[in-house]
Amino acid sequence: MNDMTPEKKPSKLAKWSRRGFIGAGVLAGGGLLIGIAVRPGNPIGALAPKVAGGDGEQLVNSWVKIDTDNIITAIVPHCEMGQGAHSALAQMLADELDADWSKIRVMQAPTDGSYVVSDTARAFVAPFTLNAADWLEPTWDGLFTQVARLADALITGGSSSIRTTGQGQMRVAGAAARQMLVGAAADAWGVPAGEITTANSTLTHAATGKTATYAEFASAAAEQPMDQTPTLKTPDQYRLIGTSAARTDIPAKVDGTARFGIDAEPEGLALSYAASVRPPVPGTRVASMDAEAAKGMNGVLQILNMGDFVSVVADSYWQAQQALNRVKVTWTQSDSAIKTTQDQFAAYARAIDEAGADGGEKAAGKGDFADAFAKSATTIEAEYKAPYLAHAPMEPINCTAHVADGKCDVWTSTQVPLMVRSALAEATGIAKDDITVHHPFLGGSFGRRLEAVYAVMAARIAQATGYPVKSIWSREEDTQKALYRPAELSRFKAGLDEAGALIAYDNIFTHRNDPAEASVPGIYAIPNTQVRVAAAPRHLPFAAWRSVDHSQHGWFIESFIDEAAHAAGADPYEYRLAMLKDAPRHAAVLDKVAEISEWSAPRAEGIGKGIAIVESFGTIVAQVHEVDMSAGKPRLVNAWAVCDAGYVVNPDGFANQIEGGIVFGLTAAMYGELDLVDGAIKQSNFHDYKMLRVDETPAITVEIINSGTVPIGGAGEPGLPPAAPAVTNAIFAATGKRLRQLPIAKQFA
Amino acid sequence: MMRMKAALVLGVASSLVAACGSSEPEPVVEQIVIRAPGEPAANAARKAATMEAGKVDLVALGERAFAQCAGCHVAEKGARGMAGPNLHGVVGRKAAALDDFGYSNALKSSGITWDIAALDRFLANPAGYVEGTSMVAGAVGDGETRAAIVAYLASTSE
């Protein structure tokens, strides 16, 4: 069995990263075309017209362009969904380029295979902290979702933009571009390149007093040789990286000019609007459609039975939705045996029961659990249940599509534009090269927009009508007919020695998606462990949901560790710390959060503090949450988070993401739950799928530790996993009531 | 070893992509075309016709105006209530009469039987007429529009 401790050295695959940027290359299978230098005479120069609009613009390479106003544009291959990646990526490029931050602009890379994010793809296949083969084999869902994405890896996810594209591409692009500019100036001025200094988008040769803007040498720079591996700055040389440089997307978001997918109003296109209804039970289709009552309604243009959904197209979205409400649709029957939430958990329990004491697929482990368990002085067992969850992004699911003359254009909010393009090609029969995916800002996503169904629906409607259509899902459709964070059941068994130390640990559950290490208590020194998977049917389709498996397993593991601490009669912080003696970074993070949360200070009556630590997406986050139970139900008072991501590029942006992850995690912990009734989802909108309100949100303190460890970790997801266990552990501390199901609020209603 | 497995996965990826290209687009099962975008709406034409004839079809106007109520109400036989109750056949009915809708206590104890006059008064200012009603939005200020909506609702009772 493999050792569960995350491997610290990068896998062999990590060697792809640097060469992956400037070298043109194709990976095995032909799926990935990686970063390509765009310069005169380069066969891939065809990319130039897509990103450089006018004669005054010179493309230095495919990730950066410099125009005659000395405005430098970072061409960013990731989507912006509020996480700040556009700005932080530009910051990394600008630092290496010694660019003037006030003159930096960000452009969304076109949906072109040349912009596939090879490092992101690799990060999805082989996480930095884990051996690739070990990860790939056991993860069935993971395997297939990853494989599908790999082929179309222009993707934003896995908290990866900064640590992959930023580190491997934007910085390299900036450094290479700077070298080429310096080279061009050296040639023109007849001075050694080494004597030229750069700052604020300006080249200077001190000895001769010559100075020029980057723009002046942009054309000549393109003729310079391109260093395949330019020297990157060391942290002491950073000017922008590590600072909270103002985000480039703030002005547009403040003055309202920012365009999101749903704002699409393509010039020259008169839009009609579609509302659609999909089958309430997964796997079923339209059986019959009676549209009589809708035909005479205002604004109605067309009523479509598309086989797998029904749409009304009208002059406005409201009219389309009103008419759709009058269309009577019946659906085929599902053959799923799972009709209710109880059925789902019963199916999970059955699979786990059948696996017995040591059955199921061995996912990870070390030592000899059975032997250690038999010798234990104390044993404990616990079973936890996590519910199905929806993403519920605030921007409704939408796509505007125009299919005409053998071409297809769509405007949509997506994390996976190239995957959308492939899905459109399949659904419309139009060649990929004739499909353009325009993807403006996303109004939230959290994994929701990692799929292509809604874009395909829009294109099929537009293809059927022959005119451009904006398709918008109602909130009810998005809550009930999407892809979901899986419900999960997890059982633990553990043995403690005479001193209370955890010496035997067994955990079995029903699905392993990704990241694979999420279900492994790898940070702790526990000598005998086994992690098992007993595959069980799942009624609702799977989606990656912010932090993916960590969202459940972070809560499972950190709750159970808390139970072990209680069984040992130990302080939950000190108990964890004792198991982190070989993990100094984790211990430092845990110590710091105990310090800033005044963990050792006495608690007032009814106040509980809970602690949890989870490493996810390369970042270690420990949290303490303070919960006031004096009114008999939880009130979230304070949250402290300490994070070690190795090195943080933009501290303010990083803290924003950790705070967002905490609030998202608390929302799910307090309220998040989807129930199954007759095979369909019961909840429909924000009245019964609640969000945490401002007045329910704790005060949050985020502290960052820059340990300098590389590769660096992510920001978008790691804040989430410790939030739920820290709160339920706090409730236990205050009341002695151990919560083994989520959500929390209804258990105190 | 590790590298071999990674390559294997990439191989699967490319074969999946190849498979994608071969499937046929799913055909449309039924396509009902009412009109083309920009073409005048049929009921707008109907309204023009009735105006031309010198008499206003109040029911038709009311049916159109009911769109402003349709966010919360349906007026269709047997349809399930939404945020507000189904108003099909409401004229002549006692207030709070439907079993499948959770009315406010105010409406339940109002003793109102909905006739044309009561509906007109209620629609003009719901909370002013029945204090404590949960109909907190949707008052119809314009008297002619109100009359048309009530006429339309009355027509569903026939």
Image (tube, coloured by chain):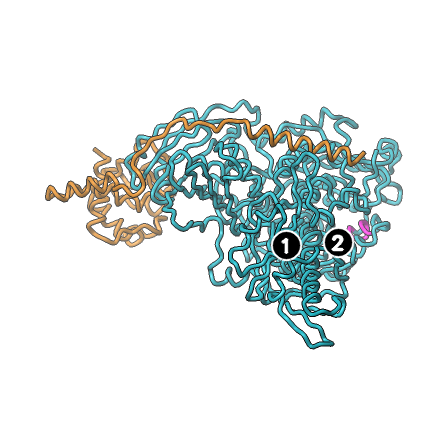
Circle 1 sits on which residue? A61
Residue at the far left: name it: B54
In the rendered structure, which amino acid carries the disc numbered 2? Thr
Circle 2 sits on which residue? A229
Q: Secondary structure at mark 1?
A: strand
Relative to A473, B131 lies left or right: left
The N terminus of chain A lies in quadrant:
top right
Figure chain in orange: B
The C terminus of chain A lies in quadrant:
top right
In the rendered structure, which amino acid carries the disc numbered 1? Asn
Number of numbered markers: 2
Q: Is residue A280 magenta?
A: no
Percent coordinates x, y for residue A382 in the rendering:
73, 37
Q: CA distance from mark 1 to mark 2?
A: 14 Å
Residue at figure coordinates x 21%, y 39% from the top left = B154
**Residue nearest the viewer, comparing A193 with A593:** A193
Q: Secondary structure at mark 2?
A: loop
Relative to A668, A427 lies left or right: left
Q: Chain of mark 1?
A: A
Residue A210, visible in the rendered structure = yes
Principal SS element in the magenta part?
helix
Part of the protein shown in magenta: A572-577
Residue at figure coordinates x 54%, y 33% from the top left = A676
Percent coordinates x, y for residue A579 in the rendering:
83, 48
Figure chain in cyan: A
Q: Chain of mark 2?
A: A
Tag 1 and tag 2, C-beta contact below 8 Å: no
